[in-house]
Image: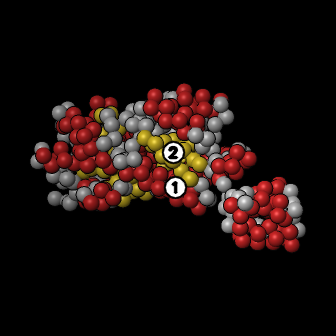
Amino acid sequence: MAGAESVTLKTLARELGLNVSTVSRVLNDPAGADSRWASPQTSARILALANERGYTRNPHAASLRTARSDMIGVIVPRLQDIVLATMYEGVDEAANEQGLFTVVANSLDVADTRRVKADMLLDRRVDGLIFGDAHLTDPYFDELRGRGVPFVLINRTCGDHPAVTCDDYLGGRLVAEHFAETGRTRFGVVAGDASTSTARDRVRGFVDGLAERGLEVPAERIVHGGFDAPAGQRAAIRLLERGDVPEAIFAVNDFAAIGALGVLQERGLRVPDDVALAGFNDTQLAAGVNLTTVRSPMREIGRRGLQTLQDLIGGKDVHSVQLEPALVVRGTAARVAAV
């Protein structure tokens, strides 16, 4: 029976006496009655019949015709990390505004896992990939470029691959300037994962900012590890075991800073009177513990990452972008009162 037939482009075209391609172009044109495909009168007939018959667009069939799935793959170290979760919210928010669907996967910050998850997403025909877990050296990104896969990095950089990040170097300098202005002269750094651009650039900015003021950070006072609270605890313990207690500690991540704060408190050190402390990112937890930190525009990084990927998919020239940080001074790095 004709009434039981599913409503397809072919059935609409047959009833209208038009070519399937004409009907398809009008229905898939956001403007609907655009005269590029048909006259206004013909377009109106097509739209009216589609509405009357309850026609709905089949996204899978459309993707086969256009070679687009309107699906974006996003890979992060861990979604429980509020920094990457916030960036992903920015990606997803911007994708929704453009009618795109995002799929997120955790790599656990492991290169082999990143490769497996990315290849699985590509097998499911995502239009492009966004990575929040890049390391300074990773041949997989060169491989993806060679395969013609569109991708963008957020949060971290790797080589000359397109990336949207915070200006991490400037963020480190902002902390150095503040510590120096408050009269501190002995410093320690909870430096994070040395294989990442965030650790490298934030530490470099901090060290360079102090050097310009005639201050230095001895190499043994820069302790690498991870970005979470336990890593911050371990790094702080190592700093305190190396002789003179630093007058100020810069942790390149809020969670590591909070871990260090716990150690300082356990050792009976007053923050900021004995040791000033600063983190990076300005997560909600930072405000909760009155932590001085560098505010990174996390959500905007995600939004700009999605737009950069769309530009890349569209054949436009894209360039890496660094968004501006801002220092947020709270109680852990307030000025020491004059004696």
As rendered, which of 248 and 10 lies closer to the eye?
Answer: 10
Residue at image point 61% right, 58% down: 99
The C terminus lies in quadrant: bottom left
Residue at image point 47% right, 51% down: 88
Residue 326 vs residue 41: left or right?
left
Characterize the local packing of mark 1: few (<14), some (14-19) or many (20 or more) Cα atoms within 10 angstroms: many
- Disc 1 is placed on an element classified as helix
Compared to 67, does 49 lie above or below?
below
Give x and y (percent) for residue 37.
85, 61
Compared to 115, does 88 lie above or below?
below
The N terminus lies in quadrant: bottom right
The residue pinned by badge 2 equals 74
Query: Which amino acid type is marked by label 1?
Result: Asp
Residue 249 vs residue 167: left or right?
left
Give x and y (percent) for residue 116.
49, 31
- Disc 2 is placed on an element classified as strand
The reply to whether discs 2 and 1 touch (Cβ–Cβ < 8 Å) is yes
The residue pinned by badge 1 equals 92
Q: Residue furthest left?
A: 268
**Residue 169 appears anywhere in the view:** no
As rendered, which of 189 and 130 lies closer to the eye?
Answer: 130
Give x and y (percent) for residue 322.
54, 49
